[in-house]
Amino acid sequence: MRLGAHISAAGGAFKAFERAREATCDSFMIFTKSNRQWAAKPLTDKEIALYKAAAAEYADLYPVSVHAAYLINVASPDEALWEKSYQALKDEIERAAALGIGMVTFHPGSYTAGDEEAGLSAIARALRRLLDETDETTPDTDICLETMAGQGTNLGGRFEHLAAIIQQAGPHERLRVCFDTCHVFAAGYDIRTPEAYAATMAEFDRVIGLDRVRCFHFNDSKHGLGEGKDRHEHIGRGQIGLEGFANFVNDPRWAGFGAYLETLPTEEAEDGTTIDMNQVNLQTLRELRITD
Ligand SMILES: [Zn+2]
Ligand SMILES: [Zn+2]
């Protein structure tokens, strides 16, 4: 697997390459705009050129992935919020495509005052429109639905949710899934032992199809199996544990797939120095590889 992390793009997306290298990443994920704001200035030709130059210089750092803004909620029953979310999601795809990035992951959304079925349909409606409006212009940027922890009215905690969205929206080859280990575990799918992992993957294959998987978020979980609580933890320090991650990194089906840490990048040591936690977590994951 191409092990990496979410990397800060402060000062420009091109700056993430150097930071990713420093953190010993093989691959990385970025935001291309502030993740807590709706609007962003369009990328300038200069920003795009700087990014493409960095991508050429750091050609061994791949695949790069984008995480869309957290505000986006195309499951919303509120038509104005839905439209705003749709436009923001489309903007995310177009920004990523302008940089030559092949995937954008977004949260399916929350149905809030509506109901589950209407929420799933609203997401599918957004994706159908997105495919219609971008298939000519950005055919090489995949749209990835993230597996979610199943908190509250949040959709994506069941594999059936993602399958229903993909079915209703197309299905289309650009519609893919980002598999977040913490979220899947929190939603009740066990991955801690080889047997549990095999059963969860078989279930994913039966319901969605493993060929829909596009990338991974590698996070351990503070909370237990099926508790529905989304709190990321450093690799091996949570309830999933090292054996769980060994199942992924040694599964030949995921060779070449990007897997990104989404935990705090630094931690203060007892002596006051700063520890690069991405380096620590990536080293932990690499040591789980069975090399024979
Ligand atoms: Zn996410
Ligand atoms: Zn995630």
Image (cartoon, rainbow, N blue to C red):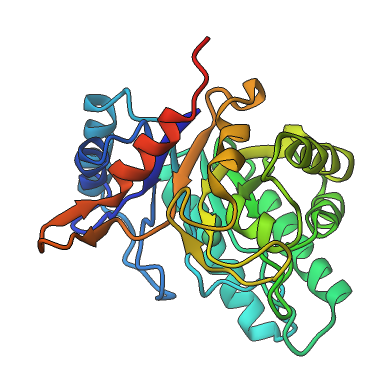
Residue 156 pos. (x, y %): 73, 62
Q: Is residue 72 above or below residue 54?
A: below
Q: Where ligand 2 lies, by quadrant?
A: bottom right
Closer-to-camera residue (95/20): 20
Residue at the limit of the structure toward the front, as seen here: 270
Q: Is residue 165 above or below residue 97?
A: below
Residue 44 pos. (x, y %): 26, 53
User: Can the viewer see residue 99?
Assistant: no
Residue at the limit of the structure toward the top, as seen here: 292
User: Can the viewer see residue 51?
Assistant: yes
- Residue at 28% over, 55% down: 8
Closer-to-camera residue (269/278): 269
Horizontal arrangement in the rendering, residue 2 relative to residue 194 (left or right): left
Residue 165 pos. (x, y %): 80, 57
Horizontal arrangement in the rendering, residue 236 relative to residue 40 (left or right): right
Total numbered labels placed on residues in the image:
0
Q: Is residue 40 above or below residue 189?
A: below
- Residue at 50% over, 70% down: 70
Closer-to-camera residue (255/133): 255
Residue 173 pos. (x, y %): 73, 36
